[in-house]
């Protein structure tokens, strides 16, 4: 089973069937839904989704859909914890000068600390060459 870390937007785009999600990533998410892969959500991704729900940008049922994905027995989706390893990686390998947005730094550091590819379309993260990017 392959593992990946996801940024917030690709997960939302998967759930909404948004065409901004590349066909390669659609395939990975579909295979994850079928139990062939595991996608890890950095803890900050879940918190960003709470924020987007509270602002009315993300509908509450979609937030619950994410929670349901995390509760599935096969474990295709799971939370990657924000812990001291992520914090250490962030300080040592993800400089603010390269990726100034806090959530993006945490997401990048999570993928780095787990040595997993990151599903993202974020230009700053991609251009940083700090982590293996899938898109």
Image (cartoon, grey):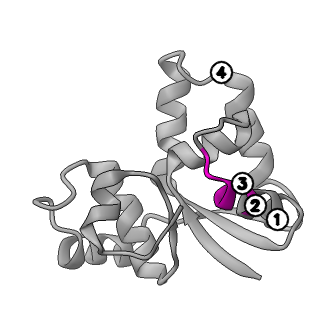
Q: Position of residue 19 (x, y in %)?
A: 65, 38
Residue 54, labelled with which disc?
none
Callouts 4 and 3 close, C-beta under 8 Å: no
Badge 3: residue crowd in 10 Å (few <14, some 14–19, many ≥20): many
Q: Magenta region's main secondary structure?
A: helix
Residue 26, labelled with which disc?
3
Callouts 1 and 2 close, C-beta under 8 Å: yes
Query: In the displayed structure, does residue 91 sit left or right of residue 87?
Result: left
Residue located beneath label 1 in the image: 31
Callouts 2 and 3 close, C-beta under 8 Å: yes
Q: CA distance from mark 1 to mark 4?
A: 25 Å
Residue located beneath label 2 in the image: 27
Callouts 4 and 2 close, C-beta under 8 Å: no
- First reached walking from the N terminus: tag 3 or tag 1: 3
Residue located beneath label 4 in the image: 59
Which residues make up the magenta segment? 21-27
Q: Secondary structure at mark 1?
A: helix
Residue at 70% x, 80% y: name it. 2
Q: Nearer the viewer, residue 121 or 2?
A: 121
Q: CA distance from mark 4 to mark 3?
A: 21 Å
- The quarter in which the N terminus is drawn is bottom right
In this view, 84 is above or below 5: below
């Amino acid at each position: 089973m392959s593992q990946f870390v996801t940024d917030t937007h690709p997960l939302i785009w998967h759930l909404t069937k948004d065409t901004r999600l590349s066909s390669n990533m659609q395939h990975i998410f579909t295979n994850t839904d079928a139990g062939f892969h595991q996608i890890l959500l950095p803890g900050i991704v879940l918190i960003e989704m709470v924020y987007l729900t509270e602002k009315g940008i993300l509908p509450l049922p979609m937030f619950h859909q994410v929670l349901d994905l995390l509760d599935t027995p096969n474990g295709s989706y799971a939370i990657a914890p924000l812990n001291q390893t992520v914090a250490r990686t962030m300080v040592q390998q993800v400089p603010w000068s390269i990726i100034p947005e806090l959530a993006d730094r945490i997401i990048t550091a999570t993928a780095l600390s787990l040595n997993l590819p990151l599903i993202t379309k974020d230009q700053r993260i991609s251009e940083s060459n700090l982590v293996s990017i899938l898109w």
